[in-house]
Every structure is written in structure tokens, then in C-alpha cells.
Image: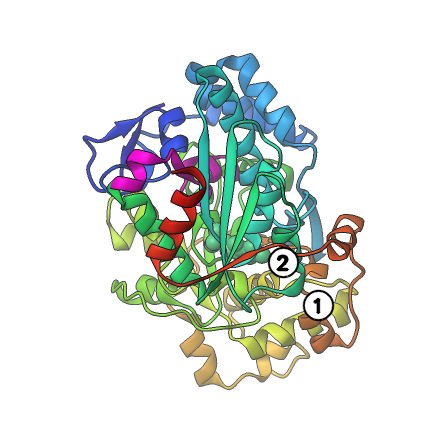
Amino acid sequence: MRLTSTRDESISASFEEAILSGLAPDGGLYKIDSPPDLSAIISRFRPETSFVSVASELTAALLGDELGAGGAREVCEAAYRFAPALARLDGEIDLLELFHGPSCAFKDFGASFLASAMERFLARSGRRTIILTATSGDTGSAVAQAFHRRDAIEVVILYPSGRVSPLQEQQLTTVGDNVHALEVDGAFDDCQRMAKEAFLDPELRRRLPLTSANSINIGRLLPQAFYYVYAGVAAGGPVTFCVPSGNFGNLTAGVMARRWGMECAGFIAATNINDVVPKYLESAVFAPRSSLRTYSNAMDVGNPSNFERLLAIFSGDHDRMARTISGAVVGDEETMEEIRFTWETTRRFICPHTAVGVRAARRFLERKRGSAAGGGEHPERRRPEQEKRRSEAGGSGRSDARRVVCLATAHPAKFGEVIEEAVGERPELPGRLAEAMKRSKSATRIDARTAALREFLLDRWG
Ligand SMILES: *Cc1c(COP(=O)(O)O)cnc(C)c1O
């Protein structure tokens, strides 16, 4: 598999080179140069095929030249001691639960695979690496868990002080050993900028073997495509995927799976009020801006890092993208209403990110039904017409599939405060999260300047 930069197709790399460098040397993101046709493999999967088998076969098909078929299976078996689960929410909405891994969020799927593949490549070449990762909460905890005690790997995690949930902070600051947490006085966008600038700093690059485990790293994105294929097969027919989005890695992975031959009716890009991509889908103007704080904090992103890759996959063609993806914007008030509504009607807790997706999915289905008969119980119908139109941002559903699979991106217990505010009760913490709450925090505080990050890195490993 050949990977090329989104900015210059003459810059290419193997998967091994790409995951160990993060960004392409021109600052672009790696993407698959010409997507393979995996439809024959996908058509052999059955609803009962296990996730790890789906992952292994796709990995062998994509990376067999670099890992070997046996190596592909070993990487997947070491990475996936957990699996996604498809669960009926109600009527036409299924939840694809992606929170059964070590950090209880979907990022475990990408981080575990990346850690497993990276450790294998490093052992083979005798090299070392330093992973630099900015997090708005969930990336850090997934990366910390996935890379803890991996040979030849140091991990540095930048997170915005006071802007991740207490539990997320515990998860990423209590791992220790080769995992170093940096508490940055700034917003997530500052953390992301600092990491990006460090990667582009020629002296740092020369002196340190830096890479990233953010979703700019293709090694995290690629395996996320596997659960779309898995869910598409398990759902038994083409569905619309609804993806709660921030940096748009998750959605990009879905689009990649579709390009490999997964049948699918389309995608809904669901965001909170940080809506630059839904705005783009509507207007063809991409206007990044500072992020705003919401209840779905892992999606508080004002300049989504994967947008460049998503656009490149559609060859820069807005209309093609807008035919495949419809946008939906869900504000905090509606997010709270959805957590409450889902709880009242199904006795299920959903995290605020998942709630953004579920609300977007309901709106999408309702529009399909013509949303004629007003006055029902569903809270959506109580919204003023204008608000509804404003927040629908660009989405005329283009598929006929009646089913929506909404990605459930985090375990609700990770956002107990928000859920309690919405419904007056808290979900119980799974054992591994309760465990993290008991450990003591260890983080280094730095200000939001790339120079401060440079100093930290060079002091330790320069
Ligand atoms: C990271 C994250 C998202 C957003 O995913 P992207 O790939 O950045 O679009 C959504 N929900 C949760 C819980 C997350 O951790």
C-alpha cells in the first residue's frame, strides 16, 4: 500500500514510514494513494464473523506486503481484546457501541492497533520513537492505555487545563512509566497547534524521533475503518452512518471503508455548535475558527485536523462530498434534551457526544418521513421552525436506507456530571474507570507556547 501526502502526491511513504513520522514532510496528511477494492473480501463476511477476524483479514489485504498475513493477524489479535457491539436503540436507530475498550471510548480501536503495529515495526528495525499527542480528553486516555509499557516508545500527551472531564484527566495523568502528561494553560486548539509546530520544527525533527498518535496519524485512522465494515455486515444491509465529529478522523475512516467497497447509504456528520464542516457542506466555504466549549467536549474543535484528508479523498470536490455526507448541528440544549429523552424512552444512558449523533439521526429520519404530523411527544417537534432550519445545516438526506447506525463514541459513565445534570442520575462506573479514579495524578504544567514544549522534549531526550 502506497501512501501519499494530501499536499503533494509525489511525496509517498510506506505504512511503516507514515506511522513513524505522523505528518508528511510537507506538512500534509498521508492518505492511501489509490484505494484497494476489497469488496470481494467484505462480501465473504457474515453477521457472525468476529470483529478481530474482520480486522485481521482487512489488515492482511491492506498491509500484507509490510506485515505478512501472519503478522497482520498477530497485530490485530494483540490489539483487539475488546470488540464493538451493535445494539438497537429504538425503531430505526442502532448504536454501534465503541466504548468497550480500555479507556471506554472509540479511540481505543485506533490507538491499540497503532501501538501494536508500531511496536512490531520498531522491534524489527531496532529504532525508538517519541509520540507527541494533543488531546481534548479521549485521545489522551486511549493513547496512554494503548502505549503504556510498550518497548522503545515514549509518550507525551498535551491536554488543555480545566477543559477535560475529571475522569479523563485521571485516565491520562495516572498511567505513568513511559507516559508523560503535559497540562497546558490553554485550549485544545493550542495543544494541537503546539504539537503541529513541534513536528514542523527542523531542529526537533533532527534531534528526536518524533511521531504522533493523533488521528492525523494514518495508523490510527485505518483501523477505525474496520468497525464500519463490521457494523455494515452485522446490520445486514446498507445503512446510513451517523458520526459525532470533532476532528473528523472517525468520519474520514468511514469514508475510507466505503471507498474499499463497503456498501453504505451515506454519512451524517453530526457536530455540536463547532460546526465548520456542516457549514462547509452547506456553503462550500471552509472557515476554521476558535473552538467553543460545549457538553460534548471531545468535539470542541474549531479547525478539524482531518478535514484536509477528507477533502483530498473527494479530490477537493465539494459537491461530491456533499452527496455522500450530510451535516447536522446539535446545540447543548438539544444535547441535554436527547440524553433525557433517550433515558426516559429506553432507560439507556448515552454520553453527550453520542447524544449529538442520536439527535442528528432522529432529525434525519424525521425529515425522511416528511415530518408532516406535528404535535407528537418527540422533543424535536417542539423546536421552533427557524432554529430547526438553522441547525440542519446542509443536510438533505440522499439515501433511501431507513436505518441509521449511530456511533456511540464513549461510555456514558465518562461524563457522569453531564448525565446527572440531564436526568438526575449517574451511570455506574465500569471497573477500569473506578480504578483510575483512585490513583494519584502526575502532570507537568506548561504554558501554551511551542517553545515550552520544545524545552520539555529537549531536556529529557535531546
Ligand atoms: C474524539 C471523540 C469524538 C470526535 O471524533 P473525531 O474523530 O475527532 O471526529 C467524538 N466523541 C468522543 C467521545 C470522542 O472522544
Foreground label between 2 and 1: 2
Where does the image place residue 31, in percent across and percent down from the top left?
Answer: 33, 36
**In this view of the protein, which residue sits in the foreground, 153 or 227?**
153
Name the amino acid type tagged 1: Thr
In this rendering, position of residue 234 left or right of residue 135: right
Residue 436: give x, y in percent of width and height. Answer: 73, 52
Q: Which residue is mark 2?
A: 168
Q: Residue 405, image x and y in percent?
A: 59, 51
How far apart are labels 2 and 1 at the CA level? 24 Å
In the depicted structure, whether residue 173 falls above or below residue 50 = below
Q: Residues within 10 Å of mark 1 (few under 14, many from 20)?
A: some
Q: Residue at x 67, y 28 (%)?
A: 49
* Residue 185 shown in magenta: no
Secondary structure under tag 1 reads helix
User: Total of numbered circles in the picture?
Assistant: 2
Cβ of mark 2 under 8 Å from ligand 1: the answer is no
In the image, residue 7 sits, relative to residue 88, either above or below, namely above
Residue 173: mark: none
Q: Secondary structure at mark 2?
A: helix
Judge from the rendering whether residue 203 lies leftward or rightward of residue 109; answer left or right: left
Q: Nearer the viewer, residue 78 or 206?
A: 206
Give the x, y percent position of residue 3: 32, 30
385 horizontally vs 362: left or right: left
- Indicate whether residue 222 is drawn in magenta: yes
Dot 2: few (<14), some (14–19), or many (≥20) neighbours within 10 Å? many
Tell me which segment is drawn in magenta. 203-224
Residue 373 can be seen in this image: no
Q: What residue type is disc 2 on? A: Gln
Specify the quadrant that holds the C terminus.
Answer: top left
Mark 1 — residue? 342
Q: Residue at x 54, y 16 (%)?
A: 71
